[in-house]
Amino acid sequence: MSLTTIGIALVVYAGLVLFLGVLSTRRSSTSPEEYFLAGRKLGTLVLFMALFGTNATSFVLVGVPGQAYHDGVGIFGLNAPIVALCTPLTFLIVGIPAARMARRLNAVTPAELYAKRFASPLVGMILFVFFLAYTLPYMVVAVKGAAVTLDRVTDGAIPMAAGAAAVITVALAYTTVGGMRATAWTNVLQGSIFATFLIVAIVLIAHSMGGVDVAMDRVEAVNPDLLRVDRDRDIFEPRAWTSWALLISLTVVAFPHMFVRLLAAESERALTTVCKLYPIALAALWLPPVLIGVWGAAEFPGLEGRESDQIFAMMILEHLPEVLAAIGFLAVLAAVMSTIDAQILTLGSMLTRDVLDRLRPPTGERDDSRDIRNARVFGVAIAAVVLVLSLTWGQSVYGIASIAFSGYVTLTPTLYLGVTWRRFNKEGAIASVLCGNVVLALGLTGVLPTFGFLPVFWAWLAAIAAAWLVTLRTPPPPATANFMAFGFRKG
Amino acid sequence: MQRRIALGIAWFGFATLLALHIDYWRPQRVIVYGGVLPEEIGYRMLWMAGAWILLLFVCARLFEDRSG
């Protein structure tokens, strides 16, 4: 693809998202609630696109085709169905009570919500540390995916370092300027770009290959195992399949950048409507990348390891006209930016409200404009760290995402029990998070035997057991804190 | 419908879907229906349709809007 086409596409896209960011500044800087949560006024459409856009990352557009290239259509069954069911369910059973509680406690970030719920800044601080630890790799995944694609479509003319820097800079610019409202509205644009592109691309690629039947025949001729679930592969082995289902179904609600968007919903009706639409959107989101990866295995056999992360770019370059290929490249950028903008904003807000504000000596009045200014500075610092990591971390997109997702899952018992179980106390929450992560670390490093399951399986069980056992052996939370968090008890 | 019955139906639906997701019993064959739809993807799409129906049921019967 010519650099001129890429350049025009990039300028138009960057101009559009920056324009939306600037438009959003009209209302975004009046208060932290406005800046960080768009005034808790995200309606159904914007909320849906914000969640969907944030959920669609280079993991789906780059990592999944890359994995399907090696493991076939089983990658669809491994991920899409269970995510389509459990992600909306977790939005309902965690997101709705959390949003109610956040309004009662006037909490703006996930860590702040749980700090106030347990009347314990330590809980907020610990949650922040783990959110940060797992969000940074996830951001690296996003940026690496975009940079790999950019490098590929320009045939190396725009190297990975320049591509990664460009992606982060643009996302940082509109996020810093416009806050949550900017990220939500840009997500509407970005979600529309990649959803439309995926549907158009799969139709045109199939047509270019001679039809879906011809494409499937070619796959069957090259490697028929790609059209079934080969249980002999490690990834599809029953225990791995079960524990991955647990991981991928629970992880999304624990993304702090997703969680915070649930807090920004205008109403519970908006959230339930989003949940009803989610399975359809996820089917449309996951199927094309898997098919592109599988068909790519017939078209470009012989890619080894993480070389297959380039298969999405290779297929669109091979089969689509230049203008559409440029839009495809923008689709990857859109997916990436719609995630990292939310991550920058959420981490920046947590650093400001959950760390800096707690380290500062109490002076009475909270300075809202200082909070927003600090969040912007932190956003720049986080972006710089991610840029460095994305250029130095050697693992595949799918591999990095697996580690980050496992970490998030260890937090889910605390996130769920914290908003639903009145007896759950700070000791239980701290024990749950720490035990879950210690077991995960021991499992990932091979110190602890996992008996064929993924380490996250044992880590999650450990987190639940610790939450339950420690809570029941320590005093209940103060009645006043419970009252403020949960309101009146029914009955 | 009483909430308890609705909750029971939701749990039953959820458990059934989970059992069907962890489908070690299903023979893994290379069958492409009509030359275009691999059996594996067709099965998962059917499963997702079931999941969607369950979600519609859960949203309609088990979640009341308290945001006013």
Image: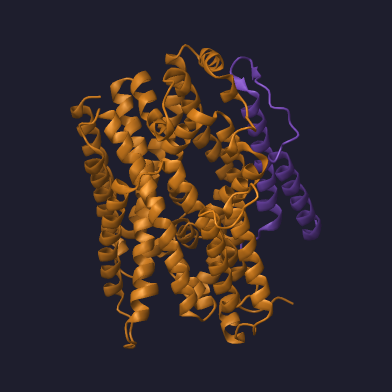
The quarter in which the N terminus of chain A is drawn is top left
Q: What's the residue at 56%, 65% (across, down)? A: A415
Q: Is residue A364 above or below residue A286?
A: below
Output the letter for the chain in orange.
Answer: A
Question: Is A289 located above or below residue A465 in the figure?
Answer: above
Q: How is the protein colored in the picture?
A: by chain
- Residue A44 seen by the camera: no
Return the x and y of residue A454 as percentages of the image width and height. Answer: 59, 49
Position of the C terminus of chain A, as image quadrant, is bottom right
Q: Left or right: A200 with respect to A84?
A: left
Question: Is residue A128 visible to the viewer in this orientation of the structure?
Answer: yes
- Residue sitting nearer the eye, B5 or A336: A336
Q: Nearer the viewer, residue A368 or A169?
A: A169
Residue A421 rendering spot, x and y as whole percentages: 65, 72
In the image, the chain rendered in purple is: B
Residue A93, position as x, y percentages in the image: 62, 59
Q: Residue at x 51, y 72 (%)?
A: A114
Q: Residue at x 62, y 57 (%)?
A: A458
Work out whether residue A234 or residue A164 is closer to the camera in this orientation and state it: A234
A404 lies left or right of A83: left
Residue A73 position by quadrant: top right
> Residue A254 vs residue A175: left or right?
right
The residue furthest front is A447
Q: Is residue A62 left or right of residue A100?
A: left
Q: Residue at x 57, y 64 (%)?
A: A436
Q: Is residue A224 above or below residue B23?
A: above
Residue A151: image x %, image y %?
27, 34
| Total number of numbered discs in the rendering | 0
Residue A213, compared with residue A23, is above or below; it is: above
Residue that sits furthest to the left in the current view: A4
